[in-house]
Amino acid sequence: MTEIKTGEAPRTPLDPRRWAALIVVLIAAFMDAVDVTVVHIALPDIQADTGASLSQVQWITGGYALTFALGLITGGRLGDFFGRKRVFLTGVAGFTIASLICGIAASPDLLLAGRLAQGAMAALMVPQVLSIIHVTFPESERGKVFGIYGAVMALGTLAGPVVGALLVEWNLFDLAWRPIFLVNLPLGIAGLIAGWLLIGESKAEKAQRLDIAGVGIVTLGLLMLVLPLTQGRELGWPAWTYLSMAGSLPVLGGFVAWERHLTRQGGSPLVVLSLFTRRSFAGGQGVQLLFGLASGVFFLAWTLYLQLGLGFSPLKAGLSGMPMSVAMMLGASLSMQVLVPRFGRAVLQTGALLAAGGMVLFGFFATTQGTGISLWQTMLPLIPMGIGMGLIIAPLTDLILSEVPHEHAGSASGLTSTTIQLGQAIGVALSSVIFFGHLGPGDPATQSHAMPAAFSGSLWYVAAIFTAMCALLFTLPGKAPAQADATAANAPAPASLG
């Protein structure tokens, strides 16, 4: 398979520090995954302590996601040009400083500024995680590594609410909500030191000028799309939100046209459009979008259902999701190390159907039991859903990046991360139509009796998305090209790709 050779770097000795370096980048990825959700649990305390208005509270939660999504593509490409280690450490340092600003903020405006900075620095940091993994580990080890990566991301996503609830409840040093941000300081400092010592530098062989025009166009297009999706529900979907989303399409179309022009002129585009000629990359982006869409719809509805519908405390709600986290870690580990090398794409499709089945089961319990649903009935459906999502997320990343040349690793990683962020933003927006549409008018806090029907109604959409994902997975190769080559040749993978 000649396409695989385009993704290989010259064979050099394996870096003996690569597994220690993996721990460093995974800690950074875990910090980001936790910070996306950790603040939600502490919002009532933050509002009471800082006197934040409702609008400011909305921006404290949505601002991080906004700047994160806007900067991912650019952040990934900066790593290609200026060095992935250098940009990663810059992101870690900035994220740590921004966390300090959030933790000591005496006003809601300063806290909001810190959250916006956190998201921007995460956009520098996170794409380098996948890029560093891609260029540091040989194909023979990459499956195991992506399995570990998927498990860590699963744990971080669901640990956020639990960590937030525990830190607020413990009220460490009488600091109330502030430790949810300050806990990043020792992790960030340790990550900086360890990263400097352990991570090897890598970048594109031909470092060219950054596509400044492309950065401006894509940032504007994504802002016009993501801002309404992030804030539309809280603002009541005013007319400007629809106009902005509609206007984003020609702007993003103009970005594609500019990137094509730049490529023809021999420049270095922000997004390498030729990547989409590779079946694994193009099909994987569609699956990634649907995955984000499903998680965006589910997690918002699930959180409101548990706390407002069933009266769970934040800590109880967070802990009730731990079976999903454990199941996702198990699914991610099994998929990459055992199942995918043998059965290929069918493992991901099985995962999509398992997740859909878990949603159907949860919908059945919520419909038949109403507000009298037992704790075990809220936890049992999360097991097949967690296993299913774990079977998808880790091998999907490997499939998407399997044919990507090393010099474009940052661009591909940033685009992949942006795709799932957009899916989640769209999913949250759809929740306002699906979940709140079933709930009807009025304050959700006073409508606990209607929560089971609204939640179960949302789950059918989630099940349908996972079913569509199963069908879309047919666009991906039956096996990752590297796996197919290794099977055909019955030979070990190359000694090194990085």
Image (spheres, rainbow, N blue to C red):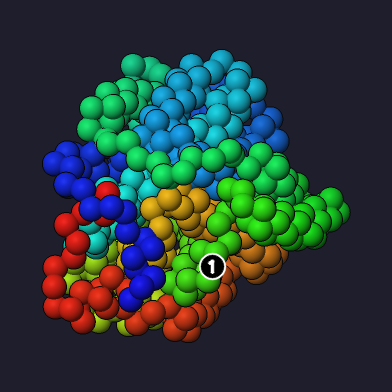
Above or below residue 434? Residue 490 is below
Q: Which residue is mark 1?
A: 276
* Snapshot quadrant of residue 30: top left
395 or 213: which is nearer to us?
213
Three-letter residue code for mark 1: Phe
The x, y position of residue 347, in whole percent, is 30, 78
Q: Residue at x 18, y 65 (%)?
A: 493
Which quarter shows the N terminus?
bottom left
Q: Is residue 488 left or right of residue 304?
A: left
Pick the front one: 62 or 201: 201
Residue 401 seen by the camera: no
Q: Establish if 13 lies above or below 278.
A: above
Q: Quadrant of residue 187?
A: top left
Residue 101 vs residue 263: left or right? left
Q: Is residue 244 among the parts visible in the rendering? A: yes
* Left or right side of 8 for 247: right
Q: Position of residue 27 (x, y in %)?
A: 30, 39
Secondary element at image label 1:
helix
Query: Measured from the top left, where is residue 255 in percent x and y?
Result: 71, 54
Q: Is residue 137 left or right of residue 106?
A: left
Q: Residues within 10 Å of mark 1 (few under 14, many from 20)?
A: some
Above or below — where is 206 with respect to 443? above
Please provide percent x and percent y for residue 66.
61, 43
